[in-house]
Image (spheres, grey):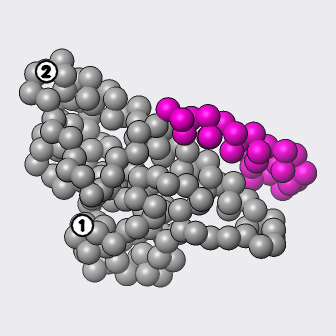
Amino acid sequence: MLFFSPDPQPIPSLIPELETSALTLLACIYFPDPITQPPILPTSASAVIDFWTSWIFQESARRTVLFAFYLAQLYRLVQGEKNLVCDGKLGLVHSWYLSAHLWGAQDPDEFALVWNERDHFLVKDANFGRVLDEAGAGDVDVFGRMLLVSYLGREQASAWFLARGDVL
């Protein structure tokens, strides 16, 4: 992958392109607010399929934008750029679902079951407070693990998982 190439010369020109693409996608994304109640899952089978399909698109887009800005900021940090500001949210107002169960649902029926019966954690602006207090290790998917390590540091994240009977 070019981003991790030992020759860093072509990468600076790609960072603005990455950010521009992410900003374009950003205009298409709905960011749920953790303060409001999650939407009620529709009852008809076709509406559940539509809800599931929309959720997959929206969550994929939310994670793509977040990761694009994360990667751009990480690149700047590794390159030793000066005066980087860390606001904890990459300069974005964003939210995403931390739920290995929702993300792992293989079909609309499994998704509906998980949506109705499992807690799904909405992380807004890198506020992991509720996750750290209430989530189990099995609630956290790979993306969530990556961001938890970035947020807490490897040692603290590892201890958090260990306290919940799992390893990072």
Picture coordinates of residue 105, whole percent (x, y): 26, 38
Write down the region rendered in magenta: 1-28
Residue 86, quarter of the rendered image: bottom right
Q: Secondary structure at mark 2?
A: helix
Q: Amino acid at mark 1?
A: Gly
Magenta segment, prevailing SS (helix, strand or loop): helix
Question: Is residue 16 magenta-colored?
Answer: yes
Count neighbours of disc 2 (C-alpha within 10 A) and say few if under 14, some if 14 to 19, many if 20 or more. few
Location of residue 54 with respect to 146 vertically, above or below: above
Give the spatial CA distance, label 2 vs label 1. 30 Å
161 drawn magenta: no
User: Relative to residue 47, is residue 132 drawn left or right?
Assistant: right
Q: Does residue 113 appear to the left or right of 158 in the view shown? A: left
Q: Quadrant of the C terminus?
A: bottom left
Residue at image position (34%, 77%) is: 160
Which disc is residue 45 wearing? 2
Lateral position of residue 73 relative to residue 105, left or right = right
Please say if 10 is above or below 108: below
- Mark 1 sits on what residue? 136
Give the mark, 2 or 1, whose residue is nearer the N terminus.
Answer: 2
Q: Residue at x 10, y 21 (%)?
A: 44
Q: Amino acid at mark 2?
A: Ala
